[in-house]
Image: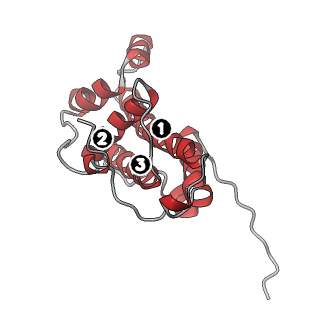
Amino acid sequence: MDTSSKIGWQNLDVWSETYIAARWIVEDKLPEKQYQAEVVDGPLSQMVLVSSHQLVEIMLFKCIKQNLKDTGKWNDVMETVLLKLNFNEAFNKWPKLILGKAFPKKVQPFTAALILAQRRNATVHSESALTTLEMAKAALYTGLMASRAIEEHFSGMPFSYEEVISKYPISDSELLSNSMYPNLT
């Protein structure tokens, strides 16, 4: 009989902590069906949507910064530029500027990542858009898939958070789409 025990420690960072928290809301707090929802579940769903976009943003800027460091182009000026850079400009222009190849924005999950950014803006800004349970689940799935695709696009290597995803899996879902809320253009 093996009486040994293993104690493991998983190094977490801002991406993995954000993912784990959003995952906890989706998997452990939100009900399965919309008719089971309570008043608090709408705002929790909004928090998941915003956090899911944050996953994409964290990964994008992390990859841009790492690439600039790896190529010797990182300096105080670039740090200032990145601090002022908005998500859409970074997403739409910087992969091409840095790598010579843009994101394939008409291909999933890149298309869904842009929809997630639109919905995040609608939720946070003027519209204070409502978020359903289905949208929260799709947002988290989109955040994960887009983060994976962004890192693989920049590095050409497997996703560095597979161990975290394996330990904290999410249920399969669909990617966000405009059909989930047709009033967004």
What label sits on residue 139 in the rendered view? Answer: 3
Q: Residue at x 40, y 53 (%)?
A: 138
Q: Where residue 144 sits in the image (x, y, percent)?
A: 42, 51
Badge 2: how crowded within 10 Å, few (<14), some, or many (20+)?
many
Q: Residue at x 69, y 55 (%)?
A: 9
Instruction: Name the residue type under label 3.
Output: Ala
According to the image, label 2 marks what residue? 115
The numbered mark, 2 or 3, whose residue comes first in the sequence reads 2
According to the image, label 1 marks what residue? 50
Q: Residue at the right extreme? A: 3
Q: Where residue 40 sits in the image (x, y, percent)?
A: 61, 46
Instruction: Name the residue type under label 1.
Output: Val
Q: Residue at x 18, y 33 (%)?
A: 100
For residue 94, what is the image quadrant?
Answer: top left
* Residue nearest the observer in this picture, 34 or 72: 34
* Element carrying mark 3: helix
* Residue nearest the observer in this picture, 114 or 184: 184
Q: Residue at x 53, y 45 (%)?
A: 42
Q: Where residue 119 sits in the image (x, y, percent)?
A: 36, 37
* Element carrying mark 1: helix
Badge 3: how crowded within 10 Å, few (<14), some, or many (20+)?
many
* Element carrying mark 2: helix
Instruction: Classify 185 as above or below 2.
Output: above
Instruction: Name the residue type under label 2.
Output: Ile
The numbered mark, 3 or 1, whose residue comes first in the sequence reads 1
Residues under labels 1 and 2: Cα distance? 12 Å
Left of 79 or right of it: where is 116? left
